[in-house]
């Protein structure tokens, strides 16, 4: 019904807002406290982001699926999980939420509500990083969600915790978050002009993983849970 | 029965005491060891607090619900979970436990048992931080507790781990803890005069989230568990 | 049967050996790498210990219960879980394992296999710390084990992660581990003469918590799982 | 059927590639940011690796078992879980994936795709470390997988998090990863000539644990789950 749909949009809005507030806010706090040690800043930023993802997906998953990411909504629509007619409003809610998250983070730290980032992020290495980061994110989601969906929050939180460190771009892996981060001239910012290529790489990586996993998990029993060292019958 | 009620009050007392001991004690330990690097102090403080919350909610949840927080007890009473007649004794037990937690932390580190904090925390940015921090905490609790209550300990521990970093106030998000922390002139202390506004912001944020989620999860099946990418029937 | 018992003793031996190797070994590694920043040493030590506990209790729990701690075995015997006739062999296996763990850690780092610690740890603040640390540990175990035993590994790992920081003694909370750590003149060592009081405090704290929880969880249904915000019927 | 087998090989390839990319990539990122503090580098490397393992085993477990490690595949074949005819292709997929993981990490950080490591790792202490590290890894896997297989991802992630710190070799514990890391002259590299002894120690440790656990869990009911303080009937 109508009110149910509204609840889902609000959940995507609120969840993405809190996600971005966590990303941007923890970057500000960490930079203020760490006396110039960038490893320590990224470590705090990582822990805050990974933990936020666990909490937010647990909380908003039952309401809207807790996509919090346009690539996830698109991929879910491709696979028939999300009605195509809802994909656009989902993505709009995420982008709107993400921008509000940046504004909230700035407000909580007494900064101007919006400031365009001058943090240059580009080049083929970072483009590849975003492709791989989002390819991995969607792989993790599709790998878990069909057979053991209750672990998705932990899998996604853990994956992003790792990906912050193993990609040169620190794994934005999320177009809504990328857009919102260009509005923050702080540690986690990205120069507005660098956003489009990040977004292209993210959609490309996410779609590639979705297509691969369409084939990869075809033979999986949909109800197979609690399987860790499974041994499917061999032909 | 009577003894059952006493057990619940003792659980709230003990759980909140351990929570505050973890917050205040880890702050003392971290400040002693970290040679002035505040990011490292907050990182240790964060990890100790988040981990303590997971352990304590797992342990005391089955006895009293492990509210450990007057805002949670009030919100639970608003939603019919906790009898109104129990809200006040719950909150009293939490405040009493919190104060004992500060005293225990001081005793464990050989400090005077009570010392009024001179740590100034105030201003609109911190007020907003506490509002948002507690709004998020109750959102996470209500988002999880109806459909997948067994994950609440992990969701709350993760949320506070993130919130320590993404708010300028380091997310007290708990009136009992705020009161207890004004009795400690150490890293995690708060000047007594700054407590009232923190408490107001916390109750306001918690009540706002409770009212929002009353509407947000109305349509959720109460028994829907293990759902991560759910697709409620659309009208 | 006989062989089943042997398996349980081997599990307690092996589990405690790995636990102590993790504690002592990570302390050695961290001190070597951290250029004198003690907060960083304790942080690495904490993460290694907490993570080891999760893995070891998950792995050895199904075989022996994964007590890995004489206080836990005594408490379990008090509550009728462990036959009294097995308490002593359990404790012997734990102490023997713990000592082997120290030796293994030293061997892995190319140090003399045994070296008496000169690390002074004593005084009433540390005695109180060990009492509270072990009181909390047993509270967490009893709080979880009756109603949601599958979460004990995570609860114990999280609790010790926190307790390393919120007690001035860094929460040994384990007589077997205490004995083994006096054989290592490294970061995590303890002067042999300081061990007895630590052990006394640990047993006192553990027994106190066991007696308290005997009363506290009396009214709990033994099969109540997945309960986080439960509301027992009130009289 | 044929396509199912191909999916399993792809899963092993992809999972191991991401694992090695996480190990090598996070080492590069951490070394760049940490201003020479090696403890901080290893801490970031640890957190990224442990988190990656959790995510990857959750995601690829349902498809291929997520061995991601030739020792695990060999051990699983020994125990009848993996057909012997599949052991070699599994291992080949893992090694191929691991090498691609190193290349991907280098590409993401704009480094030459392959560079032979000059990082000397050898001697009896490191040989023993690898034996113990892999003995522990397989102990954890066998301890969990028979009775509570759904926790394996968390147990393995936690175990490696600890083992990075408690062994002098930082716990490679994986022949495919060892081979791939000799192709990276960065923080996590290993001199090619040092790989063979590492691999020997890893297989020796893994086989020893597998044989021990064959006896240790013989009497365990295969369906016993959610048991943490179990008390098998005594004779």
Image: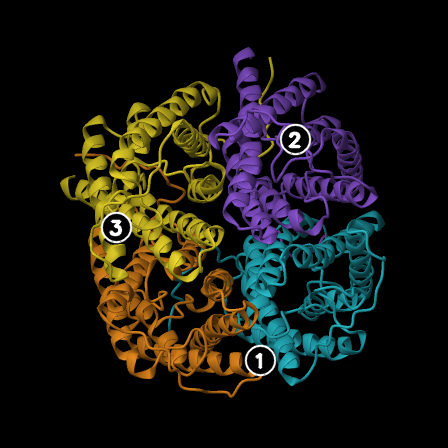
Chain colours: A cyan, B purple, C yellow, D orange
Are dots 2 and 1 in contact, CB under 8 Å? no
Q: Which mark is residue C102?
A: none
Left or right placement of residue C201 versus residue C10 in this view: right
Q: Residue B69 carries which label?
A: 2
x, y percentage for residue B135? 75, 41
Are dots 2 and 3 in contact, CB under 8 Å? no
Q: Tell me the subunit letter for badge 2.
A: B
Give SS at disc 2.
Answer: loop
Q: In terms of depth relative to the viewer, which is nearer, A221 or B201?
A: B201
Q: In terms of depth relative to the viewer, which is nearer, B168 or A154?
A: B168
Give SS at disc 1.
Answer: helix
x, y percentage for residue A15? 73, 53
Q: Are marks 2 and 3 on the same chain?
A: no
- The local crowd at label 1, few if under 14, some if 14 to 19, many if 20 or more residues have their Cα within 10 Å, is many
| Residue in the picture at 44% in, 60% down | C35
| Residue in the picture at 51% in, 64% down | D59
Left or right placement of residue C181 versus residue D8 in this view: left
Q: Tell me the subunit letter for badge 1.
A: D
x, y percentage for residue C137? 42, 34
Q: From mark 3 to mark 1, how far is it between C-alphas?
A: 40 Å
**Above or below — where is C9 with respect to A92?**
above
Residue assigned mark 1? D108
Q: Which residue lies furthest to the left in this view?
A: C2
Q: From mark 2 to mark 1, how far is it between C-alphas?
A: 45 Å
**Above or below — where is C206 with respect to C5?**
above
Q: Residue C101 carries which label?
A: 3
Left or right placement of residue D91 versus residue B214 in this view: left
């Amino acid at each position: 019904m109508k009110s149910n749909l509204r609840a889902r949009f609000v959940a995507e809005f609120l969840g993405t807002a809190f996600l971005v507030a966590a990303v941007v806010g923890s970057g500000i706090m960490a930079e203020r406290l760490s006396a110039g040690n960038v490893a320590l800043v990224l470590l705090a930023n990582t822990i805050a982001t990974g933990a936020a993802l666990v909490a937010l997906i647990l909380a908003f998953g039952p309401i809207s699926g807790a996509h919090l990411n346009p690539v996830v909504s698109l991929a879910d629509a491709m696979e028939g999980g999300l009605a195509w007619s809802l994909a656009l409003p989902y993505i709009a809610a995420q982008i709107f939420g993400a921008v509000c998250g940046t504004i909230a983070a700035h407000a909580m730290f007494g900064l101007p509500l919006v400031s365009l980032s001058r943090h240059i992020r580009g080049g083929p290495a970072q483009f590849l990083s975003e492709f791989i980061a989002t390819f991995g994110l969607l792989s993790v989601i599709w790998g878990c969600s069909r057979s053991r969906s209750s672990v998705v929050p932990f899998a996604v939180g853990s994956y992003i915790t790792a990906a912050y460190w193993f990609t040169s771009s620190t794994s934005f892996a999320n177009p809504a978050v990328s857009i919102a981060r260009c509005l923050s001239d702080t540690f986690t910012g990205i120069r507005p002009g660098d956003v489009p290529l990040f977004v292209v790489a993210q959609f490309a990586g996410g779609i590639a993983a979705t297509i691969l996993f369409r084939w990869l998990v075809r033979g999986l029993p949909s109800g197979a849970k609690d399987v860790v060292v499974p041994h499917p019958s061999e032909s």
